[in-house]
Every structure is written in C-alpha cells, then in structure tokens.
C-alpha cells in the first residue's frame, strides 16, 4: 500500500513536470511569429492651380407677371386672365414657341388696408406669372416691350445661361490640371528628383457664373414711349475651376 502511494505521488510529480515542460515551446512559438513589415508612405508633392474659360450666354429666361386689382375675386381673376392671355399672344407673335412658355405662379388674395390700425378689405388682387425660355437672345428686348405693351406690369428679371456650359467648364478644368502638373514637375526637379504617378486630383468649382438679373421696367417704359426697343447687353462670363493634386515624388538614387 505504501509503495502504491509513493508511486502515485511520483506520478503526480511527473505529471506536474510534464505540464511545466510544455510551456516553453508555446512561448517560443509566439516569439517566432513573423514581424510586421515597416511600410513607409511615398514622398509626395502637392500643388494647387486655377483654370479659367470664357462663357458666352446663348439663352435667357424671363419672368413676366400680370397683377390686377378689383372689388371682387372673380373680377380680379377675369381681368388678370384677359391681360395675361394678351401677353402670351404677344410673345407668341414674336416667335416664342408654346413649349417655351410656362405658368410659374397664380394667386388671388384679399387686398387689405389698415387705416387707424383697423383691418379693412378694399378688394382682391390676382397675380399670374409666366416664365419664357428665350432661345434667341437678340429677341430679349423685343419680348420685353411686347409683354409690357400687352399688359404685363412686373418683370421678375432676366437670367442668362449657356447650352455649352459643361464644355466650357471642362476646358477650364483641363487648364487647371495642366498648370498643377507643370508646377509639380518644377518642384520635383528643384528637389533633385522627378514626378511620379498622380495620387489624387480634386476639383472645386469656385467660379460658376451666377445668373445675371436685368431690371429694366422703368427704362423699358421710356424706350417704348420713344419708339425705341429696350437695349439688352449680354456680355461674357468667366468659369473658374480650382484643382488640388498630389503626386509621387521619385528621388534620384
């Protein structure tokens, strides 16, 4: 019995030694794991440049409105309808196609006054607005005069735009990229190396032309009374695009 107990105690000690002996190889496996490579980003050159191109508008948008007052809503609406129909007919007579005339707003509302701080209903106001997409800018003056002569009493403004805008913008974009690359090449040579592949090219449309608004109601009235067409000058617009570029710098070995 004592021998068996002694043997059992020896087996326990041997088992403990075996368990301990297995630990170093496991730790050694962790030490033998491959090291992560040390990756360095490439040297870079960053440049910013601006490109410009000239835009000449070839289309226009005009908003004509007729506003009429009457003692009743029905009367104001009827008078407004008669005058706006005359305005549209006058525009059609100048060559504007039906699909280029669209109603942009219509309303009939109370005409209220507040004498001595008290509300007083004096009638109703009917307002009807139409938008004209002008396909030929040399007709702008004649269309303004025709509409005012037919009964339009408000012009929301004239906005110019160009059907070649995207082509002009891309021309400015190309110019900006060419300038940015040329600057980067100069910088690379000055630093004793050469220019590598582009890493990033980002554009920012900083100079998109805003709509040019023409307010000529008073001048038009004088021009019509003198028998002279309303003068309209289109002019030019600039499209400006800015780009930021990043390039790989290749050092000379």
Image (cartoon, rainbow, N blue to C red):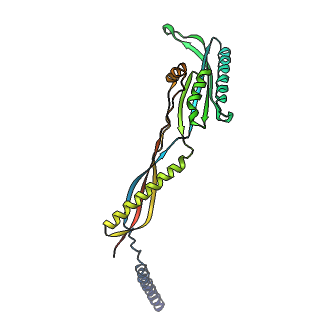
Residue 92 place in picture, x, y as percent: 67, 29
Q: Can you tell which quarter of the image residue 28 is in? A: bottom left
Residue 49 place in picture, x, y as percent: 40, 54
- How many marks overall? 0
Quarter containing the C terminus? bottom left
Hey, which residue is sitting farthest bottom in the picture?
A: 3
Relative to 213, is 151 above or below? above
Relative to 169, is 210 above or below? above
Left or right: 19, with 157 as reference point: left
Relative to 80, is 3 above or below? below
Residue 48 place in picture, x, y as percent: 39, 55
Q: Can you tell which quarter of the image residue 176 is in? A: bottom left
Q: Which of the pair 136/65 is nearer the observer?
A: 136
Q: Which of the pair 137/153 is nearer the observer?
A: 137
Hey, which residue is sitting farthest top in the picture?
A: 116
Left or right: 248, with 156 as reference point: left
Residue 51 place in picture, x, y as percent: 43, 51
- Who's the residue at 39% across and 61% down the image? 182
Relative to 29, is 185 above or below? above
């Amino acid at each position: 019995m004592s021998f068996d107990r002694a043997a059992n105690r020896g087996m326990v000690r041997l088992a403990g030694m075996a368990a301990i002996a297995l630990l170093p190889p496991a730790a050694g496996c962790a030490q033998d794991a491959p090291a992560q490579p040390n990756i360095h980003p490439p040297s870079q050159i960053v440049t910013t440049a601006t490109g410009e191109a000239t835009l000449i508008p070839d289309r226009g948008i005009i908003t004509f409105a007729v506003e009429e007052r009457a003692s009743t809503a029905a009367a104001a609406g009827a008078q407004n309808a008669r005058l706006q129909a005359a305005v549209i007919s006058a525009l059609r007579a100048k060559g504007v196609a039906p699909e280029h005339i669209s109603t942009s707003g219509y309303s009939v509302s109370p005409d209220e006054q507040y004498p001595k701080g008290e509300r007083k209903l004096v009638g109703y106001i009917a307002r009807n607005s139409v938008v004209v997409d002008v396909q030929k800018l040399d007709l702008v003056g004649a269309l303004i005069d025709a509409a005012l002569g037919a009964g339009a009493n408000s012009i929301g403004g004239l906005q110019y735009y160009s059907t070649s805008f995207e082509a002009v913008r891309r021309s400015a974009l190309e110019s900006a990229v060419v300038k940015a690359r040329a600057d980067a090449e100069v910088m690379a040579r000055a630093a004793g190396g050469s220019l590598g592949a582009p890493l990033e090219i980002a554009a920012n449309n900083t100079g998109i032309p805003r709509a040019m608004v023409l307010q000529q109601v008073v001048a038009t009235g004088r021009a019509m009374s003198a028998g002279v067409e309303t003068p309209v000058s289109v002019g030019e617009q600039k499209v400006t695009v800015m780009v930021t570029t990043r390039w790989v710098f290749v050092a000379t070995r």
